[in-house]
């Protein structure tokens, strides 16, 4: 099945429009350069902000008691978890608009295994690729498990869904089959699906890596969320590597029907969509900036606003709540939207 | 969709017949009575025996070097994993018949979360059930992750597949939808799918627990394996609780077309299929003995031999290799087969 055919698959009855698809960037939630190391503080902060964005109570009073949903033993803690079943039963509801989907990248998980074996290049007849496929999936699914746990600890009813296990596959690296019915079903029953970049089967190459960014674009096409947020480790898209002291943050980018983009803000860069070397995060492992901008532009082209911003800041909280407009001078991040 | 309809679903092209479906019983691979504790020794031994059963080399010489496929950091080990890519690339192949499916139970994982919340009874409008659903899945998928890792360390190309994520669902606790196409696809490409008992959505109850035993029966019906092995923590099915010093191991049970069963061996119990209180493992968490015998009998009725035996023994290795016949006086275990 070609990518076009997959995109045309009828969207199963979706009465509730998905509010937001959130990308937790690998660079934001893991420690780069340290194999399989989670940035606990950044992850916890992202999960807490997601909860705030979902919260239906507008009160700015004392924080409510959170119904933690990870009842597993914490590593190294001999005590059994305490679950106050009576209190939980007495709750009227979660008080959350859970109509979100979370997709995360791999960061320092999976990259080592994939690059050592060349899983992205395919060829399962090779023992190295086959072993690398298994090793990559073990690494990325262990990160998925930790992210589901972190969300659950913040009271978000998260359910892990691994693209490979869900039967998602590609043909020459483009999505060939990606049934979203279980994702929709989960949303309908009030759960937050948590997907991730994964090693998948490929019709022509045997196997490859399906990145979180491609998954988000596909889900955005299928489910038409109101907006999409990419949380990363820099403030947004810059006109050159963000480490460059002269780097300028691109605050607003417009995408036309054909997918061409142009810088709207800052005004001094208007029309300058050729000469700038656009940069999001220097250490992105799958695809890098070009893929990311391209995927974001393809989402914006559908009329869905895309916000790219730094995780764990006031700016990310505002993006998750969609408390941002083109006039928000005090918001740091990049808005990518359709020119229509 | 009713259970019957689900069972009639056309089996996607399956040129290679599945050799064996193996149940790793929760009682065998976890420590009962200790929350979320894996019986590492028993699990490692079961994985090593599975590898031996898959091995295509008949030599009894020095053990071959195992191509470990878990390249993740071990907990508490600061060193990065060593991967000898050159050696792996030079291998002609894995030398394994990987045409196996592994399904595991939950044991001391998931049970606490499910029973505290009543997930099996359904009702997702209840905050407690919703939270328990999330907590149960976190617990059982973390066990799945550890079992996939243990298999991978023994060089078995294992891939975790979570029934909920695969879109499996029930209707009044009976399987309503259980697409096996990704399982078949994984087998065809040389991977060993590893499934588990899981919390799933239910058309009538909202949600429930789908046990590993029911999954095995369903897969056996769909995929017609040559044989099925249940590894547990006792030698097989007894005529009364195996802790009773007078308990007699039932060595052979026949099942007729209608699903009625009768004891063939030992001869002294022949015809005695009413008065005996059949018992497999005292601490089974989902369904208990009755479910287990019923599921095994339904598999045997299809003409598929079922072996129930104790994990980590010479008897389990022989069962996995199918090196057992009705005349094997020195084999300890229960064979359940069709009377035809």
Image (cartoon, coloured by chain):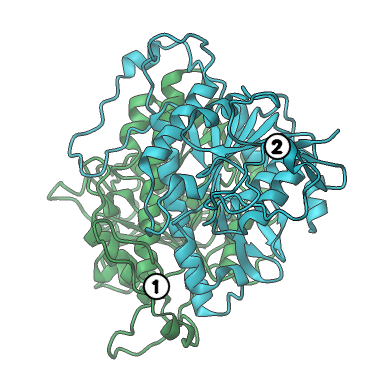
Chain colours: A cyan, B green
Q: Position of residue A131 (x, y in %)?
A: 47, 72
Image disc number at residue A266: 2
Residue pictured at 34% horizontal, 62% vertical: B150
Q: Which residue is mark 1?
A: B155
Residue pictured at 31% horizontal, 37% vertical: A72
Q: Chain of mark 2?
A: A
Which one is in front, A86 or B42?
Answer: A86
Q: Secondary structure at mark 2?
A: loop
Q: Is residue B319 visible?
A: no
Q: Position of residue B204 (x, y in %)?
A: 58, 26
Q: Residues within 10 Å of mark 1 (few under 14, many from 20)?
A: many
Say whether residue A76 is left or right of residue B72. Answer: left
Above or below, B10 relative to A158: below
Which one is in front, A169 or A318?
Answer: A318
Which one is in front, A90 or B340?
Answer: A90
Q: Are marks 2 and 1 on the same chain?
A: no
Q: Residues within 10 Å of mark 2 (few under 14, many from 20)?
A: few
Q: Position of residue B69 (x, y in %)?
A: 41, 69
């Amino acid at each position: 099945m070609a990518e076009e055919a997959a995109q045309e698959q009828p969207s199963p009855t979706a009465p509730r429009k998905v509010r937001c698809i959130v990308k937790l960037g690998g660079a934001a939630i893991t420690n780069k350069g340290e194999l399989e190391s989670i940035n606990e503080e950044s992850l916890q902060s992202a999960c807490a902000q997601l909860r705030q964005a979902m919260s239906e109570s507008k009160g700015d009073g004392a924080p409510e008691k959170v119904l933690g949903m990870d009842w597993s033993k914490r590593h190294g803690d001999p005590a059994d978890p305490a679950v106050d079943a009576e209190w939980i039963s007495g709750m009227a509801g979660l008080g959350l608009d859970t109509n979100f989907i979370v997709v995360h990248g791999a960061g320092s998980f999976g990259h080592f295994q994939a690059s050592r074996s060349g899983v992205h290049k395919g060829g399962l007849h090779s023992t190295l690729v086959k072993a690398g496929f298994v090793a990559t999936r073990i690494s990325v699914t262990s990160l998925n498990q930790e992210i589901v746990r972190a969300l659950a600890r913040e009271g978000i009813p998260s359910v892990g869904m691994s693209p490979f296990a869900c039967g998602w596959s590609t043909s020459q690296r483009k999505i060939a089959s990606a049934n979203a019915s279980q994702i929709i079903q989960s949303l309908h029953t009030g759960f937050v699906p948590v997907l991730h970049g994964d090693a998948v089967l490929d019709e022509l190459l045997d196997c490859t890596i399906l990145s979180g960014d491609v998954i988000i674009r596909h889900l955005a096409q299928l489910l038409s969320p109101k907006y999409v947020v990419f949380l990363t480790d820099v403030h947004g898209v810059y006109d050159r590597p963000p480490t460059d002291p002269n780097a300028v943050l691109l605050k607003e980018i417009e995408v036309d029907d054909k997918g061409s983009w142009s810088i709207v803000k800052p005004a001094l860069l208007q029309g300058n969509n050729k000469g700038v070397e656009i940069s999001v995060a220097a250490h992105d492992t799958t695809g890098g900036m070009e893929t990311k901008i391209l995927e974001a532009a393809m989402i914006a082209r559908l009329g869905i606003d895309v916000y790219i911003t730094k995780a764990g800041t006031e700016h990310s909280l505002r993006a998750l709540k969609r408390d941002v407009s083109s006039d928000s001078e005090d918001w740091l991040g990049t808005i990518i939207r359709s020119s229509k």
